[in-house]
Amino acid sequence: MELLWWIAELLLVPALIVILGFVFGVSFEAFKRRRRDEIYEAHPVIEDPNSLKQVPCPSVFDPAEKYMSLIIPAYNEEHRLSGALDETMSYLQQRAAKDKSFSYEVLIVDDGSSDGTSRIAFDFVRKYSVDKVRVILLGRNCGKGEAIRKRCKTGNASFTW
């Protein structure tokens, strides 16, 4: 009987050590991830490439200044972004010319691109002004859905698309 207790203790002690180590490791990793995500959740700012000043993004709780916010998530879209923005801005300008109550802003969310996406986006800010086109740079690639979800909070319009 004493031999059975000795074998049980021999198996239980290492099993408990492994289980406690696993629980500690999972808890520590979750804490690290939560802390890392808090850094990326800082209130976003928009850099005006003309003045090189950082402008805070408006909050979703601020009164709407525009009729429509158009969010364009972009990840490594250097070759496609220019053509898409040319067509989009052309349409929005025509619509604003026809209907004086129509106002808009285009939010380009650079989702951690490693190519020249942000350069192309800032060229459009210089061309149309920071009032019409804004670029929001995310520190890392979060994915299209997450980029849209996070930046819906910064749109300052009655409707966000």
Image (cartoon, rainbow, N blue to C red):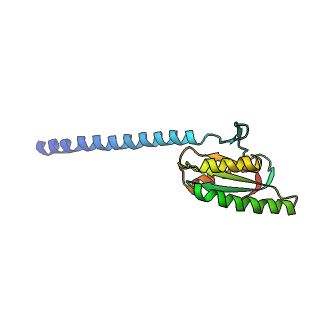
- Disc tally is 0
Q: Is 101 in front, or is 25?
A: 101
Residue 18, placed above or below residue 70: above
Look at 71% across and 62% down and name the residue there.
Answer: 87
Drawn side of residue 51 relative to residue 9, left or right: right
- Residue 43: image x %, image y %? 65, 40
**Horizontal side of residue 80 vs 64, given as left or right:** left
**Of the pair 10 and 22, the residue shown nearer to us:** 22
Q: Position of residue 38 (x, y in %)?
A: 56, 40
Q: In this view, does 38 lie above or below 64?
A: above
Q: Which of 86 and 61 is in front in this view?
A: 86
Nearest the eye: 1 or 107: 107
Residue 154 can be seen, yes or no? no
Q: Position of residue 134 (x, y in %)?
A: 70, 48
Q: In the rendering, at what x and y percent does residue 161 appear?
A: 70, 60
Horizontal placement of 15 versus 131: left or right? left
Q: In which quadrant will I find the N terminus?
A: top left
Asked whether the viewer can see residue 141, the reply is yes
Q: Image point 53% across, 48% down: which residue? A: 114
Q: Residue at x 81, y 50 (%)?
A: 65
